Image (cartoon, rainbow, N blue to C red):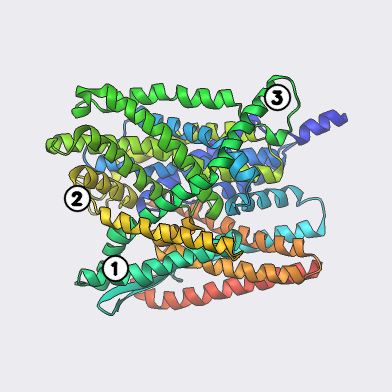
Amino acid sequence: MTTRDQSAMERRELTLRGIILGGLITLLFTAANVYLGLKVGLTFATSIPAAVISMALLRFLTGSTILENNIVQTIASAAGTLAAIIFVLPGLVIVGWWQGFPYWTTAAVCFIGGTLGVMFSVPLRRALVAGSDLPYPEGVAAAEVLKVGSRAGDGADENQRGLRTIILGSVIAAGFSLLGAMKVAASEVGKNFKLGAGASGVSASLSLALIGVGHLVGLSVGIAMFVGMLIAWGGLMPALTAAQGAAGPVDEVVGAVFSQQVRFIGAGTIGVAALWTLLKIVGPIVKGIQGSIASSRARGHGEVVELGERDLSFGIVAGTIFGSLIPIAGLLWFFAQGGPIAQNPLGVILATLVFVLIMGAIIAAVTGYMAGLIGASNSPVSGVGILAVIAASLMLLLFFGRNQGEAGTAALVAYALFTTAIVFSIATISNDNLQDLKTGQLVGATPWKQQFALVIGVAFGSLIIPPVLDLLNQAFGFAGAAGAGPDALPAPQAALISALAKGVLGGDLRWDLIGYGALIGVAVIALDEILGRLGKMRVPPLGVGMGIYLPMSLTLLIPIGALIGHFWEKRAALSRKPEFYSRMGVLLATGFIVGESLFGVLFAGLVAGSGRDAPLALVGANFEPAAIGVGVLLFAGAIAYAYRRTRAMADGAA
């Protein structure tokens, strides 16, 4: 084999077998994610599990490379993100406009919106990946998995230790998740309680993946989320529950106030923080677009452009974005039949296309930044969906007002949800794409090949989402929809977004709550700027907004993981090999995410296959008090043991 042939072999990246493998993983993971998301309101990230599966399978074939494995995880990552369309589309069934999910319409919404998400995020790579110090926790974790896997066989002692560290974290996280699924150890602990005239609560998911995310995002983001959590549960919750008298069972009161009031305040904070973030990154985004145009011209003139700087050409990006407006207009026109829009569709559809372009560009930047800040899995994309449906409903309100009668208002609500579904597809993919591009940057991938691969992943995901949604709708139905039975899937985000559209077009939305959240956002922005000018640790406003918006069960452990990571880094700085010591901590955090994610895939499949919420449960509800004690002790012990073992391995090489 010549040196040139060997170099080509090492650069093997976008291959047919990689596309097929990525597509198969996408189909499987998308189906699991759709079910899990409708059941519990959460989806799992699929990049890292896909990378692990890819390395395990391609290892048996000749010539597999780290770049080929990266393409597989890039394609499959669409499963964990595009499946989030379930946070909007079931709303059309809940409000009674659809009875099921028309295959080609649903697939087209997912594919066109997802493809736009890829295109909108192409120029963002230079601004938010190449020219940014955002942590990208999942992108870094996926890169570490790929690096360790590709070098596992070369005999290097440090690489062997790194691989053992990932395996250690993965086994511990998967083992603890298994105990939770068996109900012998609690997977979440919490207590709601009276607080003066009001009420509040404390809760935490016993998730080692959240500890890993906290370690990877760092102390600044962790503190910001903790501040938001304190605002929500130490200030807003007691005040709001006291204001309404806190009458009734405390669990019901706390749950209702959080979902119906605190989350709207959090959405207001996220909205203001998102706009401020967008203003701050407009300059880098413009430079990114200019760089993309310059790179395209240079390649067109025959100049050599480094592989790591080759995005999809500006002509392809712009052509795809504006070319997509034609099928979007067709979808909107067909969807609007039978309602007030059909009487004069031209103005509304044109306004909707402008809305999709502008809102899509804004959301791509904001969700990309949020993914870089805290990771795609924990990024509150549903909060962005809330802002999008409010904006879409307001646009319709300008055209039609509120005197459309019950049938007319229902049609406008459905149109607002349909428009939001397109924008939401943009949000979910741009939320993921930059994470993948960060992984690619760290392993030396070619950006345009990853961007093309993600479009392929979007296509695979779009094919499987409609039949899975239809199957679940026929088997269970959705809570709040006509004829939904006792086993109906909750679809919490879709129900909330549907209620918002009804609230705006019906005139009963709590604008005051969103306004309060906006004021909090302004105050946090001011604080962050002051800290920045004083040279102190900053408090990212979006992090604070996410701390308010997300349930405490998802936020409490991220600051704890960030604190653990902070102390680990301080110890690393004192070691004889600081970079290796620091990397071992990253690998352990990565292992936590890998193990829990892989178990999430398997468990989702068991739930879907068995039709039971807890197919692995060994004990009944009467064991729950003991399970809480067991869970807390094992969780704390697992963290201590994992970090102590990792420290021993790191010290052994230092």
Q: Nearer the viewer, mark 2 or mark 1?
A: 2
Q: Which residue is mark 3?
A: 298
Secondary-structure class at tag 2: loop
- Relative placement, left or right, of 621 versus 277 is left
- Relative placement, left or right, of 512 versus 328 is left
| Amino acid type at image mark 3 | Ala
Locate residue 169: give its quadrant: bottom right
- Relative placement, left or right, of 54 versus 80 is right
| Amino acid type at image mark 2 | Asp
Q: Which residue is mark 2?
A: 508
What is the crowding at mark 2: few (fewer than 14 residues within 10 Å), some, or many (at least 20)?
Answer: few
Residue 595 % position (x, y): 57, 58
Residue 436 or 597: which is nearer the viewer?
Answer: 436
- Say which residue appears at 23% left-offset and 37% top-offset: 397
- Whichever of labels 3 and 1 marks the residue nearer the N terminus, that label is 1
Where is the C terminus found, in terms of image quarters? bottom right
Q: Is residue 138 visible?
A: yes
Residue 497 % position (x, y): 30, 47
For the residues bearing labels 2 and 1, Cβ distance under 8 angstroms: no
Q: Which residue is mark 1?
A: 254
